[in-house]
Amino acid sequence: MVDASVSQRLVQAIIDNLPKPVPGQRPVHTLGIGVEGKFVASDVARTYCIAEHFNGTPVDASVRFSNGLGGPDRHDGWSDVRGMATRFHLSNGLASDLIGTTLGEFFVRNVDDFFEFSKIAKLAPYKKECWLQKIRDLLQLKFPPRNPYPGETESVDAGALRYADLHRFAQLGVFQVGLIGAPVSYVRAAYHAAHTFWVTAPDGVRRPVRFSWQPVAGVCNTDPKKAPRDDYLREELRERLQRWPARFMLMMMIGEAGDALDDCTKPWPGTRTRIAMGTLTLTKVADNQEEAGERISFNPNRLAPGIDPSEDPILKARLGAYEVSREMRGGCPFKWRPDNAK
């Protein structure tokens, strides 16, 4: 676990870069909505992992969808990373969390990288590029920044692009952010847990894996040529779930020799074996949003026996940083599983 003082600095660095911090709420992914559902593992899942939620018995699940931007302003139609945090409710009051975003890879490798990134990628007045400069950017294999949205006066894009120009490992993640768009629905986006985890099979074999949620309805973004809408994702989800459930497939990619196991900026080859681990069926928006959307606190290191974290420095850092954020807003406490209680 990263030193407590470093965790405090990580959270403070995020807050310092926000246009409008909201005391008592999450510094990023501030605005979200809690949803209820059930997860049922596939028949093959139990042969790869002994974790309780992969044994085939239906498991209650709590999901929080969110916009990546921090602060109180809702801009659902802006191009932005979206989040899907899932809690599998296990027996004896324990749980296992899986946190994914629409970003396939991260843009820093470790804590030192993050602090450097936070210094460079600060909010700055938006500078609209002319069409000629955009062509020059493309000719230089640079991603041209998008034009500001109506009412958008500050942007982190320029700073992030400067950082990516200086650090090759950041280029894939930053480039993805620039093209990510806005989903027509929270349940029409794919979400990736960018870190590597280790799963243990019944025969004791341990495998490095990466998880992702794939929407059964398919991925679909809004039309970028149309003016973005500020607020539609929550109501769209409410109306959708009143008509019928929404489903996601949990996919598990198995790593092989030579794959980056402890670096979340590096993708794995698309030829890697993928296993359909189960189906998550979302049935309703939670009645108590304070409990199911705001007070609930997820942590990517809250894992059922049978799933273990890799040595990814960013994954390790998220344990303490998420706890600092939780304590600042009075969220539900982190529970270690019995075999790693401290």
Image (cartoon, helix red, strand yellow):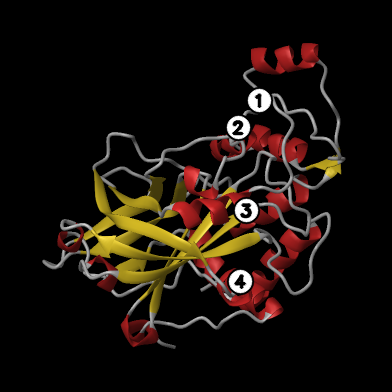
Q: CA distance from mark 2 to mark 3?
A: 25 Å
In the displayed structure, 311 sits above or below 156; it is below
Q: Quadrant of residue 140?
A: top right
Mark 3, Cα crowd under 10 Å, few <14 / some 14-19 / many 20+, is: few
Contact between marks 2 and 3 (CB within 8 A): the answer is no
Mark 2, Cα crowd under 10 Å, few <14 / some 14-19 / many 20+, is: some
Q: CA distance from mark 3 to mark 4?
A: 14 Å
In front: 311, or 300?
300
Q: Label for residue 179? A: 2
- Specify which label sits upstream in the sequence, 3 or 1: 1
Which residue is pictured at 42% across the width and 53% down the height?
A: 244
Q: Quadrant of residue 70?
A: bottom right
Which residue is pictured at 71% across the width and 12% down the height?
A: 135
- Specify which label sits upstream in the sequence, 2 or 1: 1
User: What secondary structure is found at the residue carrying circle 1?
Assistant: loop
- Specify which label sits upstream in the sequence, 2 or 3: 2
Instruction: Identify the residue position indicated by label 4 in the image.
Output: 289
The amino acid sitting under disc 4 is Gln
Q: CA distance from mark 2 to mark 1?
A: 9 Å
Instruction: Identify the residue position indicated by label 3 in the image.
Output: 235
- Specify which label sits upstream in the sequence, 3 or 4: 3
Instruction: Identify the residue position indicated by label 1 in the image.
Output: 143
The amino acid sitting under disc 3 is Glu
In front: 71, or 143?
71
Q: CA distance from mark 4 to mark 1?
A: 39 Å
Would you say 261 lies left or right of 49 here?
A: right
Query: Is label 3 or label 1 in front?
Result: 3
In front: 244, or 295?
244
